[in-house]
Amino acid sequence: MGLTTDDVVAIQQLVARYNHAVDSGDGPAFADTFTDDGVLDAGQPIEGRDALESFAKSVGAGFPNPRHIASNIVVEGSGDQATLKAYVQMYASLGEPPSQQIMASGRYQDSLARIDGDWRFVRRTFVAD
């Protein structure tokens, strides 16, 4: 059986929580979007809760007012397994006066699992344009 509408909405909410957590530097909330053995691969794999938390905390330090925008989200799967693909752009405030400028653009290719009733990223792969 395929995913339910509730599953798809829950996964879309997971994407939004991920974006808000990384943009605000909330390491614990960011790590919570992954399974215990989850991996973020943006060229070099980041694995494990501590590493994921540190990564999220570093994004705001490297970019003023970061904003991740995911679009064209496609979710497929069945049972407790799913895949997700989406486009993503990351903006930051630069210049004087500051204005939001695109810092990165690419796509996500993700695998997800439902753990104890909640969807989590097993592996989130960013492929730059």
Image (cartoon, rainbow, N blue to C red):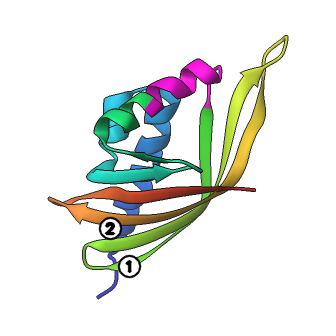
The numbered mark at residue 25 is none
Which residue lies at the image location 41% right of the left edge and 66% below the top edge?
A: 111
Which residue lies at the image location 25% right of the left edge and 79% below the top edge?
A: 79
Q: Which residues are magenta?
A: 55-66
**Amino acid identity at mark 2:** Asp
Query: What element does badge 1 sit on?
Result: strand
Q: Quadrant of residue 8?
A: bottom left
In the rendered view, would you say 15 is above or below 95? below
Q: CA distance from mark 1 to mark 2?
A: 10 Å
Crowd tier of the residue under label 1, counting other residues whose Cα lies within 10 Å: few below 14, some 14–19, many 20 or above: some
Q: Nearer the viewer, mark 1 or mark 2?
A: 1
Q: Main secondary structure of the magenta part?
A: helix
In the rendered view, would you say 7 is above or below 18? below
* 25 relative position to 94: left or right: left
Q: Which residue is mark 1?
A: 77
Count of marks overlaid on the render: 2
Quadrant of the drawing holding the N terminus:
bottom left
Asked whether the beta carbons under mark 1 and mark 2 sit within 8 Å of each other, the answer is yes
Residue 72 or 6: which is nearer the viewer? 72
**Amino acid identity at mark 1:** Gly
Disc on the earlier residue, 1 or 2: 2
